[in-house]
Image (spheres, rainbow, N blue to C red):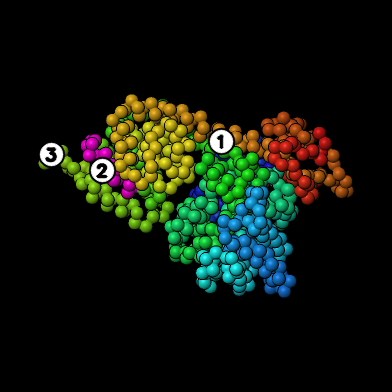
Amino acid sequence: MRVGLLTEGGYPYATGDARVWCDRLVRGLAQHEFEVYALSRGPGQERAGWGELPRHVGRVCTAPLWGEPEPRRGGWGGRRQRRRFAEHFGELAAAISAPYGSGAPHGSGVPGRSTDQADRFANGLHGLADLAGEYGGLSAALRSEDAVRTLERACRALGAPHGAQRARVADLLTVTEALERALRPLSLDWYGHGAGGDPGLSGVDLCHAATGGAAVLPGLLAKRRFGTPLLLTEYGVRLRESYLAGAAGAVGAVGASGAAGACGAVGPEGGRPLSGPVRSLLTAFHGRLAAEAYARADLITPGNTHTRRWQERCGADRERLRTVYPGMDAARFAEVGEQGAAPSEGDDRTLVWVGRIEPPKDVIALLHAFAEVRRWQPDARLRIIETRRGEDPEPDGYPAHCRALADHLFPDEAADAHSAGDNPVSFERLGDPEVPTLADAYGAGGVVVQSSVVEGFPVGLVEAMLCGRATVSTDVGAVCEVIGGTGLVVPPRNPRALADACLALLRDAERGARLGAAARARALELFTVEQNVAAFRGIYLELMSHCPVPREEVGEGGGPLPFSRPAEAHVPGRWTAGRDGDGFGHRLPGPAASRPAPEHTPTWAGPPPREPLGVGPCPSEEGA
């Protein structure tokens, strides 16, 4: 089948979120043809370029969510256009300025005003999309005085929350600029026959959004216009990231981090803090968009139960939720993992912490916990190995503060008057001669520690499990779900509990070895690339069987061509390969973009009524 992969700030760019996961998925499903529709978050991502793409990626279309919008074609400002824009944008503005608690999504069973607000958001969103398709874009209108006045009326309306009512003109300008960036996918030329007769998303069999937020908008439009099934995968809920960014009170550079990128992709560029009204309105927008995506997606695949709970709270139907854990490359850690919990080159009295040194990781609490460990285990050591790349921005002052605290808590110690002092805490960088790879980093000690106060899916914890290491973690995000009894879990922001758990494993090497072996077995069973790819292979075929996109092949004279595509064309593998030139299911070698165009041009019919997923397959128009 032909799959449209929708991404934001990731694949196919060399840097960004979910890049590695998408690449593994595409390479693992080589029997399908992929078209990538990517939204970039910043100029640095554009400069880094793309990673190496497999041959079955036939098309890559990109668009920026940063910088000034491209000049739109045609004119804007006619009375009829402005009236229609005011109507549709007014619906959307009224929905995001209403109390968010009253915005339950479609099908949630909540009566009255809650469902009305969700309908108003959907009507406004799709009305703006139709307007953009007719007149060539919305950027000028969304940044116009009309948009600001419309949003102001919605915020001053009776019943608007206090945060929206306090919005000043500067706040309204910031919000409209942010909404213009978020809604840019509505104005793209990805949806129909553009230059050269390119069908775009009208020619794919399935839209797979690799994240929520702006990336899901093209999938919503393709489903509404062409009846294309929509699959939504979230390993981190965009609404949750928006809340975290709002709690921090500031937005960094566009795409600087996961939490900042959630609002940064739709917010103003630069590092100025956002006011309370701006955060309130943008968070409401993310909430309404998430509810609309959950209501329209044919299937939603959260990456863990923690994400699934967020989706259910935002209105996702449980019957359309299916947890699919992200896949990790186990081969990278096989050598270290097969050596056991205490390899000969590692020190069983050494604690290892691996990650980015930033406030959510709470390295400060880890250092205070290690001070307590040193009171009872004087020969213990702590290796803090940072995975931040050289081109990534460093959090303001936090790493330096951690190093200064370590120097204060653990002054250099010397064995005698003739020896040089040595600090029991070392700060290292992944790629240094001592730790050239992640496997070497996790293998540098007997116990791996994770001290985060905020976490989604703990990728680093899974990597430590694949290395066969005993772990001590804080109970945040999906940690308990991932560990499953193969490690010690303590409350966050509790250095004493963290220290007690570390001491328990440092003093009992046999227990650490048993936990490490159990952790590796669990990780190999649940969190490998093979498990992830196999799950999505079955999901793709299930969606196609229940929700086939209607296609009608016609001949040169306009007459129908029955059985132009065999039913077994959707069966995985190469069963339909025939003789060269027989035109019956033969797969041509080479990239899809270099293959000759089909002899007959398909016309796209509107979407027929669909049965709910799981009821049964819709009858094919081809006959079977």
Residues rendered magenta in the picture: 363-379
Mark 2 → mark 3, Cα distance in angstroms: 22 Å
Q: Which residue is mark 1?
A: 532
Q: Position of residue 101 (x, y in %)?
A: 57, 56
Q: Residues within 10 Å of mark 2 (few under 14, many from 20)?
A: many
Answer whether labels 2 and 3 touch (C-beta < 8 Å): no
Disc 2 secondary structure class: helix
What amino acid type is highlighted by mark number 3? Asp
Q: Position of residue 588 (x, y in %)?
A: 70, 38
Answer whether labels 1 and 3 touch (C-beta < 8 Å): no
Q: Earlier in the sequence, mark 1 or mark 3?
A: 3
What amino acid type is highlighted by mark number 1? Asn
- In this view of the protein, which residue sits in the foreground, 555 or 567? 567
Disc 3 secondary structure class: loop
Q: Image check: 617 left or right of 3?
A: right
The N terminus lies in quadrant: top right
Q: Which residue appears at 69% of the width and 45% of the height?
A: 229
- In this view of the protein, which residue sits in the foreground, 374 or 425? 374
Q: Which residue appears at 27% of the width and 48% of the height?
A: 406
The chief SS type of the magenta part is helix
Q: Which residue appears at 50% of the width and 34% of the height?
A: 527
Answer whether labels 1 and 2 touch (C-beta < 8 Å): no
Q: Which residue is mark 2?
A: 371
Q: Image check: 232 left or right of 612?
A: left
Q: Which residue is mark 3?
A: 416
Q: Position of residue 308 (x, y in %)?
A: 55, 43
Examine the rendered structure and indicate whether residue 546 appears above or below residue 113. above
What amino acid type is highlighted by mark number 2? Ala
Can you tell which quarter of the image residue 514 is in?
top left
